[in-house]
Image (spheres, rainbow, N blue to C red):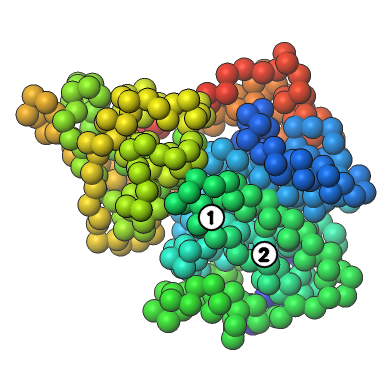
Amino acid sequence: MIAPQLAAWAVGPLSIPDEVTHAALRHLLDGLGNAVAGARAGAALPALTVATGLGGPAEATILGTTTRVSAPAAGLANGTLVHALDFDDTHAGGLVHSTAVVLPAALAVGEQVGASGREVLEAAVVGYEIACRVAAAAPNGFHAGGLHATMVAGVFSSAAVAARLMGLDAATTTHALGIAGSQAGGLLAFLATGASTKQLHPGFASQSGILAARLAAAGATGPETVFDGPHGVYDALAPASVVAGRVDRDVLLRDLGSSDPAGWETTRIGIKPWPTCQLAHVSMAAAQLALADSGAGAADILALRARVHPDSASVVCAADRDLTRPASGYAAKFSLPWSVAAILIDGTVGVDTYAETNLARTDIAELAARVTWETTAGTGVAADAAGDVEITLRDDRTVVGRLERSPGGGSNPLSEEELATKFAGNVGELAEDLASAVRALPDAADLTLLLTLAARAVTDPDSSSSSSSSLEAPA
């Protein structure tokens, strides 16, 4: 059975290759910057209000504040903060926002137990591996059934992170994973409405995972067959993929703890250059490339045709909503035509692009109406698919753009400079101090400095800067 083996690795001795440690620190840095930006934008106020109201023992800090609440309540707030702007990282194989469900549990429980920076980092790596592997074992399987893979996988990663930091043994951690499985979910119903439930999903997952570990520690039991079945997470939440033979449970344990960095999923997580759905990124970048090569401008575009992976099209090209005049800023993040038009007109896309005031821009709506698409054969996973765009110009020229994969991930990662630029845009004047605290995490005695700087970045007026964080497409 999978859960006992996964649990034994999660709480056992770890030997983490340097490349994996470096990757994890990059993602924690990016996630912390996104949380600060979300707090500064007021993008997660309902979750923060509720977490503060839940209160409890002063165990963990709500990021961007000095407010301390129970660790589960902090997980709810901080998971929502990391994901609030949809600017957080994506693991292509599982289409899962990993840091949004790893960082909240690692910081909340790490602070609760007084863990060292090294202990928090090791727990985070455990979380990254489990979140990515649980989702990647059923590529698009959860999404196809109307569920958000980030929340489905996130309850398991958060439970494992909490279990490691709490010092639970393998048997108890197996129960924690089993209990977590009964809290997996996250409906994609927000896609048609622009509702904020997607932003809440990582918060739900972080809170639920911490509770699962606590329940197991208190003596509650969970099924050790939670991954294998019958009636396990794949049978119940990705049944069509199970029937079609598209679930590969071996992914959960394959190369786990390998001495080869290539065997670690943590090294395959992409960092977003733009705060919008990652499934639109490759088309956005390909369109920029095509227009730049033509020497023309956005006003010269007569028509634009994109070739889109079918699993991407169902999310960012869905015909059941208006893609040219989205119902909300969050709905605009899930419109490929609108995001392509915005980046071609403005030259980049940032947090401010999706402000409600921008939705009334006729220039973006009119160009978005000239964007059409066709689906490809759909080989491979959607988040790792190539992007092809053909632009017809008013002077009768046709130009094409192609990228093998989205900017920011895999063979096309953000450089250290690009990541620093994104982080600075999200954090403001204290960016370098906070980045230094993250880089020093392996040698830190605790999380005090990191949490203090995150609070100052939000509350100190002198540390604020423009919230229009964005990047040009990486070369």
Residue 369: name its quadrant: top left
The residue under the point 60% across, 79% down is 232
- Asked whether, in this view, residue 186 is left or right of residue 411, the answer is right
- From the viewer's perspective, is residue 56 above or below residue 10? above
Residue 192's x, y, as percent? Answer: 44, 51
Residue 87 location, x and y as percent? 54, 38
The residue that disc 1 covers is 96
Q: CA distance from mark 1 to mark 2?
A: 13 Å
What is the x, y in percent for residue 65?
79, 32
Disc 1 on helix, strand or loop?
Answer: loop
Amino acid carrying mark 2 in the image: Phe
Res 414 visible:
no
Mark 1 Cα shell of 10 Å, populated few (<14), some (14-19), many (≥20): many
Residue depicted at 70% across the width and 21% down the height:
430
Looking at the figure, which quarter contains the N terminus?
Answer: bottom right
Name the amino acid, label 1: Val
Return the residue nearer the eye: 395 or 245. Answer: 395
- Residue at image position (30%, 62%) is 379
Q: Is residue 22 above or below residue 474?
A: below
Residues 216 and 299: in front is: 299
Q: Is residue 101 above or below residue 251?
A: above
Residue holding disc 2: 156
Is disc 2 surrounded by few (<14), some (14 to 19) or many (20+) residues within 10 Å? Answer: many
